Image (cartoon, grey):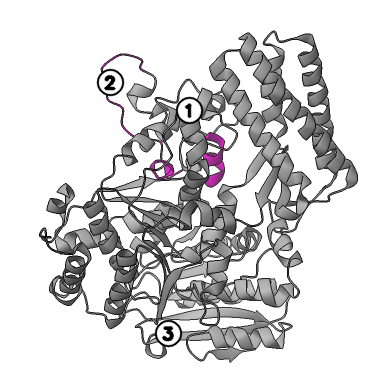
């Protein structure tokens, strides 16, 4: 195979690639990395030899490795060599976009490995669509009175080729969320791609940053780093994109890594989620009405629009706010169901009529295909809605516009068919994959029938490196709790991460601490682009960071992070997604809420000690009325014996 010349080791004609790879990996961990200043870790070497089996047998492997094992280096080495050997890039699917940045940031694991082994690595990012600027939305935003100067500056700083239609231009990727660090998340939402943008008909798509980024990462030779949600979106859309004559979102990979792989089920559900807004169908049906179609067809379109309006009216009437969540509960009733059934029948009939229209050439074929594809989506969405037991549904409001969201409950069969049936090395990496020492739960939830697995503990000496303090407080003593946190921040002179379980908790804390005169910077998630905040936090030794979404993956070594404060136990919200999970179990608290909380708690605690040199303290708050069994389980899940304050 011609690509072997690019491998960092020789493979002769008679040699086995896997044997040679194993020898080289041994050299790397026993000699090359220690020579470059990295410590030799038995746990890492153990992991490396376990992972080799997955590449040899082209199988799924659950690699459960404690904090500090150095698992990223292990999978990067295998992926890189395997990609070069097969001539197809490896895909590394991280839990979310902030973890992507962690991996590829300056002095992140990829750069470190590249420097230590003197290897040039071709790594490209494939971010989810919502991480890119949408020129269409930016155009609208420019005309709005309340648009901030920061958003207007985005337009002023667009690359010149965006608005210059001259010839001989060089188009380069742009428009990634990380390029607009100063924008708050709220501002970014007004100009970034969302599910309701129709890129296939957009006249700007050849100059759009999202399209250009896609062209860029498709040419990757070594590694493509994306989010799990984006990888799954790729999987679900491969066939339809091919049908439409488009390239799949991602190229065919040689192997796949799911970093923080315990989150894949939810990412898969999210990427299969349908969203329906009143405006969506209105636009397409109105387009058909203006297309000079037959009278009987026009009547059908008018009737459908009427049903659609009634359906949305009823959705609005039956949505109920859920505290602490953006998701509104939908109270299903017969009226809604019968409207959905009527609507589905009407849309199906429109589909049939369109076949006739296409034969009459009354509508442009390209436009017709787009409408047809959208109508199929709406029909699939209504099918799930009608068949309640197979989906979770809820309502969201964005600027008062109602969106019906429908997420399938079980994705295991689809995953089995589309992903895990393939003969390909697939690695799940996380510190928390098993339950009671078994991988069966995660394997079943993902439709994985045949797999390899192993667990390896963290090499850190937690007794020596960390302290844990538990504060017992009454449930309603939020102010008292926030006061203790402020004191703890001051006593530690910053250098802390405060983890909240909801944005509401974080806002309450923010309004209190804003009145304090702190001697160190305090950053809040959402104030600007997340990787930029993390970078500031890391670079300023006394800074502190308050976050809702950094329970996983954040990897800050050294003095910048010597205290992790857990504001409250990370129980799941009472939103429709978890309500639905609870409904399917005999004992929702012990089967859903408690395991979720314990896993997330372990992840949160894992943010503190990231190297043998790290020292620090965990501060945890437990309410006095917490069930005794849960209290015991929390204590059991801690890596060391805590001190308890009441
Ligand atoms: S291609 Fe899509 S994301 Fe890009 S400008 Fe057009 S609608 Fe927006």
Of residues 22 and 587, the one drawn nearer to the viewer in this rendering: 22
Disc with the residue nearer the chain's start (3 vs 2):
2
| Residue 258 seen by the camera | yes
Disc with the residue nearer the chain's start (2 vs 1):
1
Which residue does the numbered mark 1 point to in the structure image?
A: 135
Question: x%, y% of residue 234?
Answer: 47, 44
Say if disc 1 is inside 8 Å of ligand 1. yes
Disc 3 or disc 2, which is closer to the eye?
2
Is residue 20 rendered to the left or right of residue 617? Answer: left
Q: Dominant secondary structure of the magenta stretch?
A: loop
Say if disc 3 is inside 8 Å of ligand 1. no
Residue at the image position 67 percent from the left and 72 percent from the top: 593
**Residues rendered magenta in the picture:** 164-191
Of residues 390 and 314, the one drawn nearer to the viewer in this rendering: 390
Disc 1 or disc 3, which is closer to the eye?
1
Which residue does the numbered mark 3 point to in the structure image?
A: 466
């Amino acid at each position: 195979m011609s690509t072997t010349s690019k491998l960092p080791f020789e493979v002769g004609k008679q040699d086995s690639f896997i044997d040679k790879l194993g020898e080289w990996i041994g050299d790397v961990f026993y000699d090359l990395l220690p020579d470059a200043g990295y410590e030799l870790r038995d746990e890492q070497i153990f992991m490396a030899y376990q992972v080799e089996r997955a590449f040899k047998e082209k199988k799924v492997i659950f690699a459960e490795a404690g904090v500090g094992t150095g698992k990223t280096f292990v999978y990067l080495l295998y992926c890189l060599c395997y990609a070069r050997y097969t001539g197809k890039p490896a895909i590394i699917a991280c839990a979310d976009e902030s973890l992507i940045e962690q991996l590829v940031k300056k002095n992140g694991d990829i750069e470190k490995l590249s420097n230590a082994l003197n290897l040039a690595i071709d790594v490209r990012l494939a971010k989810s669509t919502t991480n890119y600027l949408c020129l269409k939305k930016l155009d609208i935003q420019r005309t709005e009175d309340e648009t901030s100067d920061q958003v207007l500056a985005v337009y002023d700083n667009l690359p010149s080729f965006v608005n210059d239609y001259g010839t001989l231009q060089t188009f380069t990727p742009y428009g990634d969320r990380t390029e607009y660090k100063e924008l708050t998340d709220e501002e970014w939402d007004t100009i970034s791609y969302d599910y309701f943008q129709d890129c296939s008909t957009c006249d700007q798509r050849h100059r759009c940053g999202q399209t250009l980024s896609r062209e860029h990462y498709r040419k990757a030779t070594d590694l493509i780093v994306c989010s799990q949600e984006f990888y799954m979106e790729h999987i679900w859309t491969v066939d339809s994109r091919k049908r439409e004559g488009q390239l799949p979102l991602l190229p065919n990979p040689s192997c796949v890594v799911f970093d923080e792989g315990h989150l894949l089920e939810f990412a898969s559900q999210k990427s299969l989620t349908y969203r329906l807004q009143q405006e969506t169908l209105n636009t397409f049906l109105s387009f058909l009405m203006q297309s000079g179609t037959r009278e009987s067809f026009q009547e059908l379109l008018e009737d459908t629009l009427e049903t659609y309006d009634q359906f949305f009216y009823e959705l609005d009437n039956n949505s109920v706010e859920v505290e602490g969540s953006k998701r509104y509960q939908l109270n299903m009733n017969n009226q809604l169901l019968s409207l959905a059934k009527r609507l589905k029948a009407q849309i199906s009939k429109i589909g049939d009529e369109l076949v006739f229209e296409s034969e009459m050439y009354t509508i442009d074929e390209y436009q017709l295909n787009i409408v047809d594809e959208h109508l199929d989506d709406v029909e699939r969405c209504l099918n799930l809605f009608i068949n309640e037991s197979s989906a979770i549904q809820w309502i969201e409001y964005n600027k008062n516009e109602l969106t019906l969201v429908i997420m399938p409950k079980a994705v295991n069969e689809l995953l089995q068919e589309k992903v895990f049936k393939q003969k390909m090395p697939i690695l799940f990496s996380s510190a928390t994959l098993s339950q009671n020492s078994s991988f069966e739960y995660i394997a079943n939830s993902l439709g994985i029938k045949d797999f390899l697995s192993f667990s390896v503990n963290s090499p850190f000496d937690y007794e020596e490196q960390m302290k844990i303090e538990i504060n017992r407080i009454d449930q309603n003593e939020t102010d008292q709790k926030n006061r203790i946190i402020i004191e703890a921040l001051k006593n530690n002179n910053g250098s802390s991460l405060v983890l909240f379980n909801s944005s509401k908790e974080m806002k309450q804390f923010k309004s209190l601490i804003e009145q304090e005169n702190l001697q160190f910077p305090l950053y809040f998630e959402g104030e600007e682009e997340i990787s930029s905040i993390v970078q500031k936090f890391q670079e300023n030794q006394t800074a502190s960071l308050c976050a809702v979404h950094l329970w996983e993956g954040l990897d800050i070594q050294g003095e910048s992070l010597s205290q992790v404060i857990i504001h409250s136990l990370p129980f799941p919200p009472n939103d429709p997604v978890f309500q639905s999970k609870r409904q399917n179990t005999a004992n929702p608290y012990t089967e859903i809420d408690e395991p979720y909380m314990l896993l997330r708690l372990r992840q949160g605690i894992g943010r503190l000690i990231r190297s043998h040199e790290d020292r620090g303290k965990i501060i945890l708050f437990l309410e006095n009325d917490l069930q005794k069994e849960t209290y015991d389980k929390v204590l059991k899940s801690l890596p060391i014996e805590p001190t308890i304050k009441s």
